[in-house]
Amino acid sequence: MAQRREKKAPPGKERRPIKKKTSILITESIDYIDYKDVNLLRRFMSERAKVRARRVTGNTQQQQVAVAKAIRVAREMALLPYSVRQVTQRSKGRRDRGDRGDRGDRGDREGELRDIPGPIRDEERPAAVDDANINEGALDQATIDQVENEFNGSDGASAPTEGDGE
C-alpha cells in the first residue's frame, strides 16, 4: 500500500498568520441588503452569475443567507441573470487521444471525404447560363394578374390594375 506522507509544520517564526477576509458589507457598513441594489449584489456573484462562497466574500453566515436570498429575489424580478451566455467555446472531447487521431480507435475509412468543402469561389463557379434557360419557369404577366385577383377576391373584370390600358 502507499504510505501517507506526514506534513511538517513550518517553525513558529516562519509561519504567517492567516488573514481573515473582511466582508464588503462590513467595510461599507451596510446593514440591510436590498434586492434592488444590483450593483452590490453583483459583487457577490461570479462572472458566470453564481453566488460566491463565504470563504471568498468573507461574509458571516447571516450575511451570506441575506445575500443569497436577495440574489434569488432579484433573479425572480429579472434584475439579475440566472446564468450568463457562454462566449468562448470549450474544447470538444478529450485532448489526449494518443496515436488514435481524430477517428478514435476506429481507424480510417475507405472512400471517406477528408476535407469539407467551403463556399464556392467565383473562379470555381460554372459559366453563366443564358437568359432563355433561366426564364423557362417564369410566369407571364397574365398568370400573375390572375393569381393576384384570386388572392384579392375579385374575378378580374371589376377593377383595372396598373398594367391595364386606360
Image: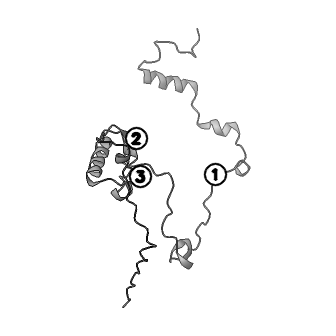
Q: Are marks 2 and 3 in contact (CB under 8 Å)?
A: no
Q: What residue is shown with label 2?
A: 39
**Image spot of residue 44 (x, y percent):** 37, 49
Colouring style? one colour
Q: CA distance from mark 2 to mark 1?
A: 46 Å
Viewer-side label of 2, 1:
2
**Image spot of residue 56 (x, y percent):** 38, 57
Q: What residue is shown with label 1?
A: 119
Q: Residue at x 49, y 64 (%)?
A: 92
Q: CA distance from mark 2 to mark 3?
A: 13 Å
Examine the rendered structure and indicate whether residue 150 appears above or below residue 121.
above
Q: Give amino acid for label 3.
A: Ser
| Mark 2 secondary-structure assignment | helix
Whichever of callouts 2 and 1 sits on the residue coming sooner in the sequence is: 2
**Image spot of residue 118 (x, y percent):** 63, 55
| Along the viewing direction, whichever of 2 and 133 lies nearer the viewer | 2
Whichever of callouts 2 and 3 sits on the residue coming sooner in the sequence is: 2
| Mark 3 secondary-structure assignment | loop
Check the picture and name the quadrant holding the C terminus. top right
Q: Residue at x 71, y 52 (%)?
A: 124
